[in-house]
Image (cartoon, helix red, strand yellow):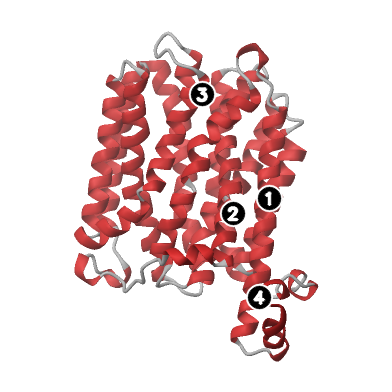
Amino acid sequence: MAYYATHPDEMPASFFEYSLVGGLSISAALIISPLVTIVRKRIGLRLTLILGSVLLFLSLITSSLATKMWQLFLSQGVCFGVGMGLSYISGAAVLPPWFTSRRSLAVGCATSGVGIGGLVYSIATNILIEDVGIRWAYRILGFCGFGANLLAAFLLKEWGGRTQPDIVLDEERFDPRDFGRIEILLLIAWGFATDLGYVILLYSLPTYASSIGLTPAQGATSSALLNLGLALSRPLIGYISDSFGRINIAGILTFLCTISCFALWLPATTYAPLLAFSLIGGALCGVFWCTITPVMVEVVGIRKLASTFGSLCIAMALPTTFGGPVAMQIAGSGEDLKFTHAQLFVGFMFLTGSLCVWLLRCWQIFKVEMEQGDNSTTTVRTRRYWVSWLTPRFLFSSRRV
């Protein structure tokens, strides 16, 4: 989309439409997440991954043939998103049941592939476009991705090494009434705020690089470093989450995202500071998707993980769809492109997310003590249940959660 935005003759459209294509590709994957859970139970993990691989391949091939914007909406937006949902969400729900003591580390190592893939794609796509053009770049990426996804489909197994659809791990269904639970609402608020900031940062970084006078190649390098930061940090985040508490680390890292935006991105008006922010910001800004599954296991339990994760993903569809367009509307377009307001907006979104995790931590400590039969907590519950967990005792507790 960055290529089409700088070459409007190839695909005439507005900045809003270019941004919307990228947002649709993510939101479509999230919207179908409950359907992915059903499909995986009906046809099994392997066939679900193969189906996702085929749709991803078809989306890139048809994108290479697109001549109008609505065709890109359907191919690179909707079709790619559905394929990504079948592939990514299925894989994300498979890993946690394999581990107990080092679950966050395992998830961190696995999700570092997102950063590695983004790093390779950022560099490779820019080179391919320069050498063979945008259409053949789509086709080459399609064939490469198809081969890698098929390999993963045949190697990945569910907990216990079982891949048959009739013996999937015993899971509980998500109850819509759970949306009224405090912990679920806080998870949604955390995800909504941080995902909106993350998507705006991810999709606007190359455009921001152009706005400060850098070349497309330098913008691609900044995106590559952002993905490198994602890849390098996720195993470390997983390790420290297991050591110091998954909710604790999620909140601290979300707050550090705020600091990185205000202290590093705002003053980054030349190439070197932008690269520094890309690497450090990349290491921090993907904290939600790196920590959400281990945090959800702590909050709802392993048996409700897949169904709750699917329902949570639906709530994330709104920020992922409109994150890019929101950034463009805040920043403006053309010669009036100014990113200061967008940068401040991203920083405040991460700040909001960190406050939500802090409140989630307080609630979790309160719930644990209540389940353990702490007399003072039980007494407080009978008198002031809805406000008792917001007392300084829980807000500033040093407990590991």
Q: Which residue is mark 4?
A: 365
First in sequence: mark 2 vs mark 4? 2
* Residue plotted at (72% across, 28% down): 340
**Mark 2 to mark 1: distance in Å?**
8 Å
Q: Which residue is mark 3?
A: 16
Residue 229 visible in the picture: yes
- The C terminus lies in quadrant: bottom right
On the image, the x and y values in percent for residue 286 come to 56, 48
| Relative vertical location of residue 250 with respect to residue 171 in this rendering, above or below | above
**SS at badge 1:** helix
| Relative vertical location of residue 275 with respect to residue 197 in this rendering, above or below | above
Q: Which residue is mark 1?
A: 352
**Three-letter code for the amino acid on which mark 3 is drawn:** Phe
**Residue count near mark 2 (Cα–Cα under 10 Å), binned few <14, some 14–19, many ≥20:** some
On the image, the x and y values in percent for residue 322 come to 52, 35
Residues 325 and 84: in front is 325
First in sequence: mark 2 vs mark 1? 2
Q: Nearer the viewer, mark 2 or mark 4?
A: 2
| Relative vertical location of residue 343 with respect to residue 13 in this rendering, above or below | below
On the image, the x and y values in percent for residue 272 come to 70, 29
